[in-house]
Image (cartoon, helix red, strand yellow):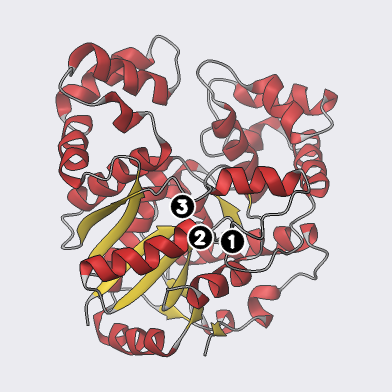
């Protein structure tokens, strides 16, 4: 059985995602598709539009066979940390042949060549010097390429899907994985998840843009209130430990939380040329969840099933012998045998409980909700 894997968020699942699952699977001649999906919090530093089980079910109904949850210690991080954690987890499953990802470029050879440059010692040294000027990491990376590597197409580091693609390739190389990277050009005929979320925020219909029904999303005001309450009551020493918090930034968060009435206002007050809006949003999510820098460096401890079909069951059976990490179908049966396992699972459970507050549901859903079987 040849298996294609996709690292995803499905925030929400849309027609472009369905196109990737069906068309790239056909192009690669894969027999099955595994998705590793962000759970309650996503990479842009916010709660997902729908709960993780709903989004996983959408994926299996539209081309996936098996969906695992990407632990929140990876999912709410920078592109580099997000990609590395996800790739490492997929590699440990022992059943993945191809990693499929969309890109604006659509040229795997160009992406591989650029990834080699970005992760070379020469580039890293130049980047370190550029970061000392006080600009953000994305801006510094682009300037280093423009000034020193004219052979590189700058659009490869200016577009979000290309950037993630470069990180996936780099992570595969770093761990010496046998998984082969494969890209499919992003089809601009399909609306992006960002544009769909914007329409949803405005109350506009997105029925023609997604293959599933529209549901009620999480309460954004409730999330704003949670974040502001957290920063107002938390001590500075505790805030200092938050992932990506540095250079006295905790003081700015503390001060801004006293005068802000939303996460947008908070982010506007704190952001700078070094700290982008997205990075500020991720710090908010990480602080709320108590995620510290060292948590993001944990080795993957488990793979948790969210949804599957009959073919997915076959993959799970194959993984019993192949996987280097435990596969969790029932949280109550999980047996944390390391401190890393315990912390990683605790953060996932906390993320779900916080998300439950935002959707008027009780705590403990991870213990009460079984993986969804799609027939």
Answer yes or no: is residue 252 visible: no
147 is higher (above) or lower (below) than 68:
above
Which element is circle 2 on?
helix
Q: Is residue 350 visible?
A: yes
Gap between marks 3 and 2 measured at Cα? 26 Å
Please name which of the two marks, 3 or 2, marks the residue nearer to the observer. 2
Horizontally, is 130 left or right of 41 in the view? left
- Mark 1 = which residue? 210
The reply to whether dot 1 and dot 2 touch (C-beta < 8 Å) is yes
- Residue 149, image x, y percentages: 18, 19
Helix, strand or loop status at disc 1:
loop
Q: Where is residue 229, by image quadrant?
A: top right
Which residue: 35% across, 51% down?
102
The residue that mark 2 highlights is: 15
Per the image, the residue denoted by label 3 is 74
Q: Are marks 1 and 3 in contact (CB under 8 Å)?
A: no
Within the image, what quadrant is residue 180 found in?
Answer: bottom left
Depth check: 97 or 21 in front?
21
Callout in the foreground (1, 3): 1
What's the CA distance linking mark 1 and mark 3?
Answer: 26 Å
Out of 65 and 359, give the one closest to the viewer: 65
């Amino acid at each position: 059985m040849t298996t294609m894997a996709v690292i995803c968020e499905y925030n929400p699942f849309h027609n472009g995602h369905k196109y990737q699952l069906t068309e790239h699977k056909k192009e690669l001649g894969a027999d099955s598709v595994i998705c590793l999906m962000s759970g309650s919090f996503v990479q842009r530093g916010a709660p997902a539009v729908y709960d993780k089980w709903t989004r996983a079910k959408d994926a299996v109904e539209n081309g996936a066979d098996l969906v695992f949850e990407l632990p929140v210690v990876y999912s709410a991080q920078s592109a580099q940390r997000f990609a590395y954690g996800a790739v490492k987890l997929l590699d440990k499953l022992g059943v993945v042949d191809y990693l499929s990802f969309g890109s604006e470029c659509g040229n795997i050879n160009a992406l591989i060549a650029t990834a080699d440059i970005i992760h070379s010692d020469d580039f890293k040294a130049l980047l370190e010097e550029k970061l000392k000027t006080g600009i953000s990491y994305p801006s510094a990376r682009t300037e280093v390429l423009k000034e020193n590597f004219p052979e590189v197409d700058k659009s490869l580091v200016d577009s979000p899907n290309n950037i993630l693609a470069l990180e996936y390739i780099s992570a595969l190389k770093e761990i010496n994985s046998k998984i082969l990277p494969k890209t499919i050009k992003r089809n601009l005929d399909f609306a992006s998840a960002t544009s769909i979320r914007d329409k949803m925020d405005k109350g506009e219909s997105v029925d023609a843009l997604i293959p599933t029904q529209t549901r009620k999303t999480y309460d954004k005001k409730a999330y704003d209130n949670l974040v502001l309450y957290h920063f107002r009551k938390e001590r500075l020493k505790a805030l200092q430990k938050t992932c990506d918090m540095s250079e006295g930034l905790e003081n700015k968060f503390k001060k801004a939380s006293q005068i802000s009435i939303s996460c947008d206002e908070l982010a506007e007050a704190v952001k700078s040329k070094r700290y982008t809006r997205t990075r500020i949003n991720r710090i908010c999510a990480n602080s709320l969840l108590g995620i510290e820098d060292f948590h993001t460096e944990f080795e993957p401890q488990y793979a948790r099933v969210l949804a599957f079909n009959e073919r997915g069951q076959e993959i799970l059976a194959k993984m019993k012998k192949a996987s280097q990490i435990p596969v969790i179908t029932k949280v109550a049966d999980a047996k944390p045998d390391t401190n890393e396992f315990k912390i990683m699972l605790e953060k996932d459970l906390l993320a779900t409980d916080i998300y439950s507050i935002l959707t008027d549901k009780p705590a403990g859903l991870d213990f009460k909700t079984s993986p969804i079987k799609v027939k």
